[in-house]
């Protein structure tokens, strides 16, 4: 097996010296092309690059007028919306450094991030986000101004979005080169972004990312040839997460248009309206589509269910043969056409009918889900990376759909497997380090520029990476057997249409158990079909639901090694949530938090 893949010397398309210059270059290169679209009163409002650039420059000049210095940290606490993009661009153009804060961040972590980063300014979505700082103002001494995206403020310590723009207009009237001169002072090594990881344990760590990281990633993504200027990109991912931010860097490099709406419940409604060609998402979104479509097909029963199953099995078999260089038979074209007409065209219509590809990242995507989407003509290319390497390290190429892998390294990136199986990364996208955490830096940043990811993986003969689990998430039974909870959970969520999450518990226990949380929407449909009544908590504990989950656990166990099988499980009376600290903003389970919250339920499964 290959132990190292990728090259640091791959030629890349030219890019700007810094992210700020990249923004200005994009505006100058394609001023009249559409840049951003936002939902407004039931429709979408589109801005050109010239209009967007004008807004970004005014807001950036407003920050200069407030006294923003080079590398000053500006925190942004907002949901995903076009104003977030403009706020981030304004900070870049003014030479500041964006410190991202999820809007769901607790007051305690909010003040910690503000203080640890030394943020001087806060751009808050609304009064609720501003209050997190105002209520702890005495504990955030560096904070000098809050800017409200929605709301008026007090005109002094808290100013409005419009007031920031007015300050910028006045500054540019005094000095028309204010932004240009500041951008000229920004070096590749200048701090651009401090992203605080929402990791599964401990305090968030500030990941220090200079401008050079972002322009490298932008150029590397362009080199792939996967995204093109004519693409229509639908963005709903949290922009406080590195996955969302790297898509913006790619947009500035390539020039496609982005439709932005961070309201997750609106995704299904927005897709046929926006009609994107590209959309990125986390695995849970694709799992829900997969589960929902299959559940609906089975509920229809009879001929419809048989046609549905035939279409997917036939398409998957034909495409597998074609990728292997084998003949799929003389009727392959006719069969694919019929499958598309009867089944796939209806699924494609729900996505707007123009999707070329989906991109999945942030967590492992189940191979069965990827095969299902590919069979339907909606390929998902899975990517891999960390906040610590500015999001992107590996990705599946559309012409090399190796399911179950995260593909080959990005151009300019190297991947190595250490002796203990840990995945190591090297390239210009690796972070400068964690902010104020020398011990953590010594652990993560290895000699010769390698980054220790904490992930366990293998490389195949073609240099494609497969992630098997997190190094620190492997659990060991009292019998000495290792279990990979993440892998088991990913399998189960594909098997069970009711499941939202499965948390495997086995460390130092003599057998594995699991906590199961249910998807509210799926449970509601199941309850209607089964004639169940009552609130969510009551329905989760019904015999009918327990029997359904038991059947799914049995199916899961049939696919596992004996020591991995789930001997007992408990269905939780509520879904896991980000608000309770049990999920990260990218929907990863914080297993240790869940185990603390439900310790009594876990202990009961080992009592007899």
Image (cartoon, helix red, strand yellow):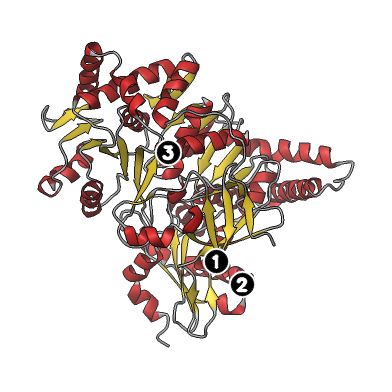
**Left or right: where does residue 78 sit relative to residue 18?**
left
Q: Nearer the viewer, residue 219 or 127?
A: 219
Asked where in the image residue 350 lies, by quadrant, the reply is top right
- Tell me the quadrant of the picture where the N terminus can be found: bottom right
Going from the N terminus, do you reach mark 3 or mark 1 first?
Answer: 3
Q: Which mark is residue 488?
A: 1
Residue shown at the point (22%, 45%) measured from the top left: 118
Q: Is residue 563 above or below residue 595?
A: below
SS at badge 3: helix
Kindly state the secondary structure of the residue where label 1 is placed: helix
Which quarter shows the C terminus? bottom left
- Marks 2, 3: nearer the viewer: 3
Any part of residue 459 in sight: yes
Residue at the farthest bottom position? 608
Q: Is residue 433 above or below residue 124?
A: below
Task: Provide the secondary structure element on which disc 2 rests.
Answer: loop
């Amino acid at each position: 097996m290959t132990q190292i893949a990728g090259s640091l010397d791959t030629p890349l398309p030219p890019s700007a010296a810094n992210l700020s210059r990249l923004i200005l270059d994009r505006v100058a290169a394609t001023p009249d092309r559409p840049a951003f679209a936002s939902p407004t009163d039931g429709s979408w409002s589109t801005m050109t690059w010239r209009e967007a650039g004008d807004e970004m420059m005014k807001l950036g000049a407003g920050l200069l007028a407030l006294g923003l210095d080079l590398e000053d940290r500006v925190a942004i606490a907002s949901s995903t919306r076009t104003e977030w993009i403009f706020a981030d661009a304004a900070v870049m153009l003014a030479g500041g450094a964006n410190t991202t804060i999820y809007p769901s961040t607790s007051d305690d972590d909010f003040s910690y991030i503000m203080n640890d980063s030394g943020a001087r300014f806060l751009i808050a979505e609304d009064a609720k986000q501003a209050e997190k700082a105002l209520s702890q103002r005495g504990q955030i001494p560096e904070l000098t101004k809050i800017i409200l995206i929605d709301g008026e403020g007090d005109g002094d310590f808290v100013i409005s979005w419009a007031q920031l723009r007015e300050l910028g207009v006045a500054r540019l009237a005094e000095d028309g080169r204010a932004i240009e001169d500041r951008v000229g002072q920004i070096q590749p090594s200048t701090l651009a972004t401090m992203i605080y990881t929402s990791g599964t344990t401990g305090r968030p760590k500030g990941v220090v990312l200079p401008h050079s990281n972002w322009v490298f990633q932008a150029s590397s993504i362009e080199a792939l040839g996967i995204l093109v200027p004519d693409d229509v990109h639908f963005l709903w991912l949290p922009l406080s997460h590195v996955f969302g931010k790297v898509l913006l860097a790619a947009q500035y490099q390539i020039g496609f248009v982005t439709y932005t709406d961070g309201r997750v419940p609106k995704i299904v409604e927005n897709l046929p309206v926006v009609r994107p060609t590209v959309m990125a998402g986390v695995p849970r979104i694709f799992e829900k589509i997969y589960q929902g479509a299959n559940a609906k097909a089975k509920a229809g029963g009879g001929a419809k269910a048989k046609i549905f199953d035939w279409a997917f099995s036939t398409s998957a078999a034909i495409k597998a043969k074609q990728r292997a260089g084998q003949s799929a038979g003389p009727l392959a074209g006719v069969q694919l056409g019929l499958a598309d007409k009867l089944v796939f065209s209806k699924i494609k219509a729900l996505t707007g009918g123009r999707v070329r590809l989906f991109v999945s990242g942030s967590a492992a995507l189940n191979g069965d889900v990827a095969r299902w989407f590919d069979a339907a003509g909606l390929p998902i290319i899975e990517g891999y990376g960390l906040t610590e390497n500015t999001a992107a390290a590996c990705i599946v190429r559309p012409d090399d759909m190796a399911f179950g892998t995260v593909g080959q390294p990005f151009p300019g990136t190297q991947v190595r497997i250490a002796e203990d199986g840990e995945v190591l990364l090297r390239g210009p996208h690796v972070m400068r380090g964690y902010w104020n955490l020398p011990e953590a830096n010594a652990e993560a940043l290895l000699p010769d520029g390698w980054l220790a990811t904490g992930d366990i993986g293998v490389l195949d003969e073609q240099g494609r990476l497969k992630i098997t689990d997190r190094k620190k998430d492997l659990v060991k039974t009292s019998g000495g057997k290792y279990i990979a909870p993440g892998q088991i959970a990913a399998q189960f969520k594909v098997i069970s249409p009711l499941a939202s999450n499965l948390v495997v518990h086995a460390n130092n226990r003599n057998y594995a158990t699991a906590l199961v949380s249910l998807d509210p929407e799926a449970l509601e449909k199941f309850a209607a079909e089964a004639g169940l009544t009552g609130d969510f908590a009551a329905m989760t504990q019904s015999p009918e639901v327990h029997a359904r989950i038991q059947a799914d656990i049995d199916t899961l166990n049939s696919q596992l090694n004996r020591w991995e099988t789930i001997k007992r499980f408990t269905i939780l009376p509520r879904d896991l949530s980000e608000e309770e600290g049990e999920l990260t903003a990218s929907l990863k389970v914080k297993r240790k938090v869940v185990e603390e919250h439900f310790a009594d339920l876990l202990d009961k499964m080992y009592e007899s």
